[in-house]
Amino acid sequence: MLGYVLRRLLGAIPTLAVIVVLAFLLTRLAPGGPFDEEQALPPEIKANLERAYGLDQPLPVQLGRYVAGLLRGDFGPSFKFKDFTVTELIATGLPVSLKLGLAAVLLAMLVGIPLGVLAAARHNSAVDHAVTGFAVLGIAVPVFVIAPLLALVFGIHLGWLPVAGWTPGTVRDMVLPVVTLALPVIAYIARLTRGSVLEVLRSPFVRAARARGIPGRRVLTRHVLPAALVPVVSYLGPATAAVLTGSLVVETIFGLPGLGRYLVQGALNRDYTLVMGMVIVFAALMIVLNLVVDVLYAWLDPRMRPGRRR
Amino acid sequence: MASAGLWSDAWARLAANRAAMTSAALLVVLTLLALLGPMSSPYAPDAIDWEHMAVPPSLESGHWLGTDRLGRDLFVRTLHGARLSLAVALLATLVSLLIGVTWGAVAGFAGGRTDALMMRAVDVLYALPQVFFVIILTVLFDRSVFLLFVAIGAVGWLTMARVVRGQALALRQREFVEAAVASGAGPVRIVFGHIIPNLMGPVIVYATLMIPQMILVESFLSFLGIGIQEPLASLGNLIADGSAEMETAPWILLVPASCLVLIVFSFNFLGDGLRDALDPRER
């Protein structure tokens, strides 16, 4: 297993390298530079600024410098947040985004899986229809509609929770953002679990377990659930992608100082280094999370274990 | 395989699916409304009604879905937004169809090392959620609406390429392809003349399911302010506008948001219906 993990980590290096080069080239090809202000800067000052940031060098030299910096953990200076390096912004933003994302994925699993199992166990009952309806709704309503609606109801009308802001260490500020991020994932997981449990319930080994006289609840938790969870685990990769994407909106709406908000501001400001840094961090996060999912998958489903040829 | 029988069977199954047919009808009505509706209204999308600023939906004021804080008619603006959002989505879907189907069909048909290399490229691009690439591309294309469509499409083709490749791999083994090879057809002709026409079923299904995703991507970017910009209206920037005013005037948020949800819903139902109709095995 350790060998497998190491091999996968090594395999991620070329992927990451391609993403770095792509991100670098795309942002550098962009028309307009980070120093285009409403009021045009005098050309000498602009030239000086570009020299200070190394933007006057040919592209390959810039790329080489950037990559050399990356290897030392230096993402370069931010063009618009003038007193910060991108590394510093990542260091402040990453914990916020990670906390939000992990909480959302956990919440989604804790709520989504039981909902799906419940719906499948009571197939075609009112509970089943309610869960299915909720699932359809949750998939169609985007995060940027859920967020203002939740803020309107729980933040403004009921006044239970803060509408925006971030005080380190408080849970109250996280409730609305986490719920917003989790809702679509809950919907998807519930639908997936329901379908998968229904399918497993029909398989012969479940009938065999019933025939041996094992009580229904135990069949459900011990026999059906482990088999039914395999597709749910394989959805965790896309789920984290959805949560990371959603965090762009959620952090912007709720005013949280996470990576997503920096990425959006970087894109609006043409802050090359910031955009690239954030994209690279997000890509690395995705790669690591996908690896975790694959390991979990192998652990759940022996057929998928590495070393066994498919 | 694409005989008249398959398509008429599929049509019969689709016609029996009430949710899918309702959605299709709804989409036709919405599209017509988006195209023609603004003309039926006395208000232009950017006309300011000084007498009625941020009025709630009512019949008396003449703005039966209300106005925004600048006194612009929400009915007209939402329809305009829906039109632009639908246009974005259709164009983006078309672009990703062209790239994805060609890429997948060529990879699947070529097989071997070409296939491995082409699909490896797809894997690399998959490592990052597509929205992140679109964000880089919007920086690149300086927020030109047309290029934005193309950019969204250019990164949305990955799933399509995978689906098509799988199908093409299977089709490659079939007798009619072998017959085409035997009768001296070149690879280009086989891919475009034999493989692609025979995988239209799944392509149609995924295209239908892709449109709502493209609408969501467009709205997402416009909501963040890096997509379609004022004074143009898209569902995304209308929702962004509305969420800024929701404390005092919730309808400015609710009108475009409901429109968006309705469209996304309908496309999803229609796509699911098409999948069941065209591929009854997979449910």
Image (cartoon, rainbow, N blue to C red):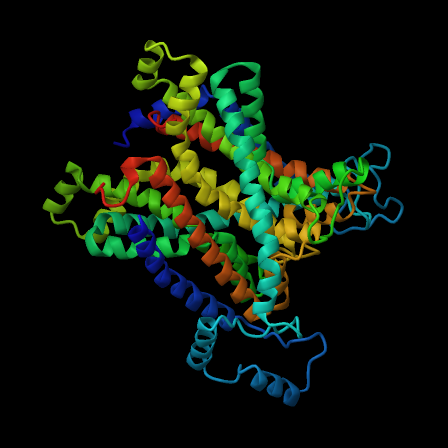
Q: Is residue B262 left or right of residue B8?
A: right
Question: In this view, which residue lies farthest toward the right?
Answer: B51
x and y percentages locating residue A62 in the rendered image: 47, 79
The residue at 49%/72% (across/down) is: A29
x and y percentages locating residue A107 in the rendered image: 57, 37
Question: In this view, which residue lies farthest toward the bottom?
Answer: A44
The residue at 54%/62% (across/down) is: A278
Q: Residue B248 sits in which quadrant?
A: top right
Question: Is residue B42 something that shows in the picture?
Answer: yes
Q: Is residue A73 above or below residue B67?
A: below
Q: Residue A111 sits in which quadrant?
A: top right
Q: Is residue B251 left or right of residue A309?
A: right
The residue at 45%/50% (across/down) is: A289
| Quadrant that contains the N terminus of chain B | top left
Q: Is residue B19 above or below residue A236?
A: above
Pick the front one: B140 or A108:
A108
The residue at 58%/39% (across/down) is: A182
Q: Is residue B194 left or right of residue B218?
A: left
Pick the front one: A3 or B99:
A3
x and y percentages locating residue B211 in the rendered image: 50, 42
Pick the front one: B230 or A182:
A182
x and y percentages locating residue A109 in the rendered image: 52, 35
